[in-house]
Amino acid sequence: MQGLALGVVAILALQQAGQPAFKSGVDLVAVDVHVVDKNGNPITDLRPEDFEVQIAGKKRRVASAALVSYASRAPAASPSSAAGDANTPTPDATPRPRRMFILAIDEHSLHISNALAAVNATERFLDRLQPDDLVGLQAYPTGSAHYDLTTDHAAVRLAVRKVMGLFQEPSSKFRLSPSEAIDIASGDRDAMMAVVKRECPSLVCNQNEIRNEAISLSGSIEMRVSQSVGGLRSLVRSVEKIPGRKLFVLVSGGLISTDRGMGRANTGAEISQLAREAAQANVAIFALHLDWSFIELLSSRGGLRTSYFRDSNMAASGLESIAGTAGGTVFRVHGTSPDVAFDRVLRETSAHYLLGIDAASEDRDGQPRAIRVKVKRGGTQVRSRTSVVIPRAGSQPQ
């Protein structure tokens, strides 16, 4: 897969003006946190004492909480403008920091129909960005829709039109849903008998044939999930050396992860590795789940399955695990335009806090450690990564 390349020197030049500085003591670790209300509007008046942070289950002091705002600001008034000279532009005294968006589009998970809706909504999203927001594009696995990080939003707008929907529902003699296939392949006897009762009310079914089909379908699901997670991991690794905080906007038709404790389609290990790599690369992931399965099932030859809601939730759970561990969240779109979800991404990413955490010496071992951030105020939603890697003394924190 192609990486998203913009030279480090060029990025530094673009980011230099307005990039917030984190003034830390020797023992402070920087952690990015989004805090929003129920409508996704950033809460901007929090102080260090409003936050609670635990690293590896142990409370750590929050020494500072700097608000980083990306909202456009009106130019400061100058003496000449105060005197009535409205034609004299005055630059903002404090340069505004810029966001770095990377559009990651999982073509394997998108049908042709919702791929088209995703393309149209993505174009409108690009039109609403701040002029100096950096944006890059990578559709995987084909890589045909690709653009390096740039402020030329019109060029990315043209590139995104190459996105393709590659998802094809595998054929199933017994009309097995994803959850049924996973259950039967995992040895669930009750799931097997439910399929036998539905598919063979007056005939003797060959249960081995059903089981073999379930194993085949589960294998297809696992392969598709591995390709999707692998594509996202490759993209995360490709931006690791680009300085600054990267905001991934992941557009997906779903990423199935089992809701069973054990068995097939268990993606926990792969997602955990992705979370560690996202933390290392300073990446936050906001996912748009284009869930049109209800509409597709109504028009399919098999009709609406009784397992629809479980299938839909399993398709969302993989995305929720990825986004939740990487400091973002999932916005589910049920058969409508993704514009509302894209608008929510813009609102939530318009500001965040940069916390200075007083880490203990035992935290500084260069290994992934669980981190939990809470806010002592009701009605808030906190977006923060779930793991942090704190380098050993003498190294720079990620």
Image: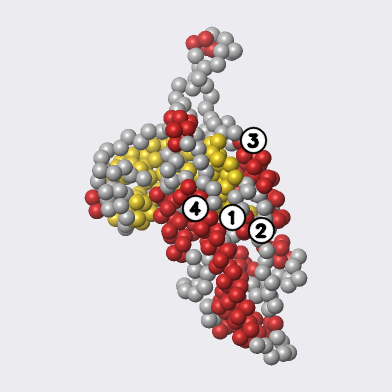
Q: Which mark is residue 234?
A: 4
| Quadrant where the image shows the C terminus | top left
What is the number of the mark on residue 176?
none
Type of amino acid at the residue the image marks with label 3: Ala
Considering the numbered disc 3 on the image, is that residue within a helix, a strand or a loop? helix
Closer to the chain start, of discs 3 and 4, is 3
**Which x, y percent locates residue 284?**
47, 48
Q: Answer yes or no: do the residues labelled 2 and 1 have beta carbons within 8 Å? A: yes
Where is residue 264 shown, x and y percent of the image? 52, 73
Residue at left 55%, top 60%?
Answer: 227
* Color encoding of the figure: secondary structure
Residue 166 drawn above or below residue 339: below
Which residue is denoted by mark 3 in the rendering? Answer: 154
Within 10 Å of disc 3 (Cα), the crowding (few <14, some 14-19, many 20+) is few
What amino acid type is highlighted by mark number 1?
Pro
Label 2 CA crowd tier, 10 Å (few <14, some 14–19, many 20+) = some
For the point 62% across and 59% down, the residue is: 109
Dot 4 amino acid type: Ser
What residue sits right under mark 1 in the picture?
A: 141
Q: Earlier in the sequence, mark 3 or mark 1?
A: 1
